[in-house]
Amino acid sequence: MKKIMTAFLFFTMIFSSEVQALTENSKAIDFELRTIDGQNEKLSDYKGKTVILNFWTSWCEYCYEEMLELNALYDDADRTKVELLAINITSQERSEEDVRHFAQVNKIHFPILLDKKGEVMKNYRILGIPTTIIIDEEGMIKKTMFGPVTKKVIEEEIKK
């Protein structure tokens, strides 16, 4: 069932005539979302830092696989310079409780933001999940990576 849902989401987005990925070197779109802990997070609050946005769902196998890598990245990152924000596409989940349960079971250390209406996903024109976007200190999209990522790959992209 999860693979079918992942494939459905991926192909629905890819074959939509209006969907194109935001290009590298374009301005990141500001947003404000609530975390699973009830805090509000705004992208523009992180200007001056490299921000890693990771779009995911709890039922996505590939998303699950990369969570350990993202935990390791977050734990080792100098958060005065780098921040990781995991944007759960909550509009594609069965419930918010599924997201909380996933975070608890997998001991996620980084902030999980809830995109309840799918607006941030649409604004960033996410073609499939997982998708990771690196935003530089000036708020410009530096790199978009489709599919699961590793700590090493992200660290190498940040250094470029």
Image (cartoon, rainbow, N blue to C red):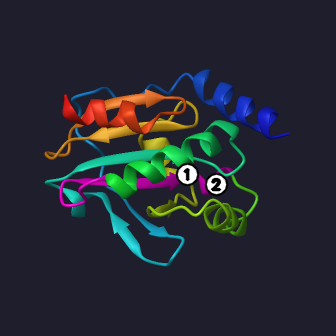
- Looking at the rendered structure, the kind of residue marked 2 is Ser
The spot of residue 92 in percent (x, y) is: 67, 50
Q: Is residue 119 left or right of residue 43?
A: right
The quarter of the picture where residue 31 lies is bottom left
Is residue 142 shown to the viewer in this render?
no
User: Image point 45% across, 25% down: which residue?
Assistant: 20
Residue reaching furthest to the right: 1
The quarter of the picture where residue 2 lies is top right
- Helix, strand or loop at mark 1: loop
Residue reaching furthest to the bottom: 38
Residue at numbered disc 2? 91
* Quarter containing the N terminus: top right
Q: Residue 118's mark?
A: 1
Residue interval drawn in magenta: 77-92
The spot of residue 109 in percent (x, y) is: 47, 63
Q: Look at the image and say whether residue 74 sits in the magenta stretch.
A: no
- Looking at the rendered structure, the kind of residue marked 1 is Gly
Circle 2/circle 1 CB separation < 8 Å: yes
Q: Look at the image and say whether residue 82 sits in the magenta stretch.
A: yes
